[in-house]
Image (spheres, rainbow, N blue to C red):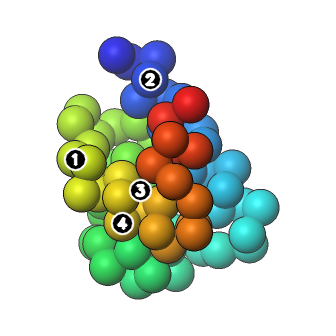
């Protein structure tokens, strides 16, 4: 599971950098706190909820599967 969380964080960071979006901007687009974005991206969030992942995916205009694979 730790590998999967690390993958999710890396995918979010990659997408964010590709789209040239700051963590602060992503938090606003996803309607999540900046702390949530930082902890999920870093892998420190032990259990990102499906709602959190769905909001982030929607902000990037990708599917949740793009975040977890």
Of pointers 4 and 3, the one earlier in the residue sequence: 3
Q: Do the residues labelled 2 and 1 touch (CB within 8 Å)?
A: no
User: What residue would you read off at disc 1?
Assistant: 49
Residue 17: image quadrant is bottom right
User: What residue would you read off at disc 4?
Assistant: 55
Residue 66: image quadrant is top right
Neighbor class of circle 4 (other Cα within 10 Å; few <14, some 14-19, many 20+) is some
Q: x%, y% of residue 47?
A: 22, 36
Q: Which mark is residue 38?
A: 3
Q: In this view, does 55 lie to the left or right of 26?
A: left
Of pointers 2 and 1, the one earlier in the residue sequence: 2
Is residue 4 visible in the rendered image? The answer is yes
User: What residue would you read off at disc 2?
Assistant: 4
What residue lies at 41% left-to-right and 83% top-to-bottom? 28
- Give the camera-side residue of 52 and 61: 61
SS for dot 4: helix
What residue lies at 73% left-to-right and 69% top-to-bottom? 19
SS for dot 2: helix
Residue 8 lies, with reference to residue 34, above or below; the image says: above
SS for dot 1: loop
Of pointers 1 and 4, the one earlier in the residue sequence: 1
Q: x%, y% of residue 26?
A: 50, 73
Of pointers 4 and 2, the one earlier in the residue sequence: 2
Q: Is residue 60 left or right of residue 31?
A: right
């Amino acid at each position: 599971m730790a590998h999967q969380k690390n993958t999710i964080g890396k995918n979010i960071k990659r997408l964010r950098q590709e789209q040239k979006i700051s963590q602060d901007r992503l938090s606003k687009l996803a309607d999540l706190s900046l702390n949530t974005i930082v902890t999920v991206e870093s892998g420190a969030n032990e259990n990102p909820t499906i709602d959190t992942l769905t909001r982030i995916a929607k902000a990037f205009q990708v599917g949740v599967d793009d975040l977890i694979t």
